[in-house]
Amino acid sequence: MERSLEIMFIILLVMINTDYSMSASCFTCFPCPDPFNPSDRRITNRTDCNWCASIYPKGFKVPIRECVPVCKTDVWSDIYNSFSYSCCNQDYCNKSVQTRTTHQILLNMVSALSCFFIIRCK
């Protein structure tokens, strides 16, 4: 019984941490309106994207949102001298600053501690 509970718990953790999407839909705009409004006519919706990106070139007041095949600095380094960027791969995730990574790290830490205490209490 205890063994099956452990297996079920591990399966649950794997399911929570798995991204099932094979492609994402993204907002694209250059320049993007500030504040961001998805219904603005300057914004288009792209599908079948590998990554949604938000690029913040130095000197620009608003970000640029794109659909990109890879999330690497090389994609924008030829265009912009100085910039920061963030990428995500869930539908319309480039609407705002993403906190999923932080949530994922916290979830993994809580999961690891839970496993530790479950095993230790035996």
Image (spheres, rainbow, N blue to C red):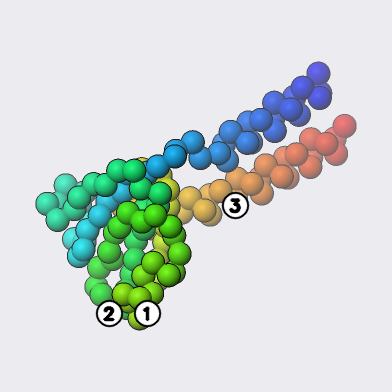
Which is closer to the viewer, label 1 or label 2?
1
Q: Position of residue 27 (x, y in %)?
A: 27, 51
What's the residue at 31%, 48% (across, down)? 26
Disc number placed over residue 59 in the picture, else none: 2
Residue 81 visible at all: yes
> Farthest residue in the right direction?
122
User: In the figure, is residue 93 to the left or right of 111?
Assistant: left
Question: Could you tell me how far apart the alpha carbons at marks 3 and 1 are, in whole angstroms?
Answer: 28 Å
Disc number placed over residue 25 in the picture, else none: none
Disc number placed over residue 105 in the picture, else none: 3
Which quarter of the image is occupied by the C terminus? Answer: top right
**Within 10 angstroms of label 1, few (less than 14), some, or many (20 or more) residues?**
few
Residue at the spot of label 1: 82
Numbered disc 3: secondary structure: helix
**Which of the 4 image quarters holds residue 47?**
top left
Q: Position of residue 82 (x, y in %)?
A: 37, 79
| 103 is higher (above) or lower (below) than 82 | above
Question: Could you tell me how far apart the alpha carbons at marks 1 and 2 are, in whole angstroms?
Answer: 9 Å
Contact, CB < 8 Å: mark 1 with mark 2?
yes
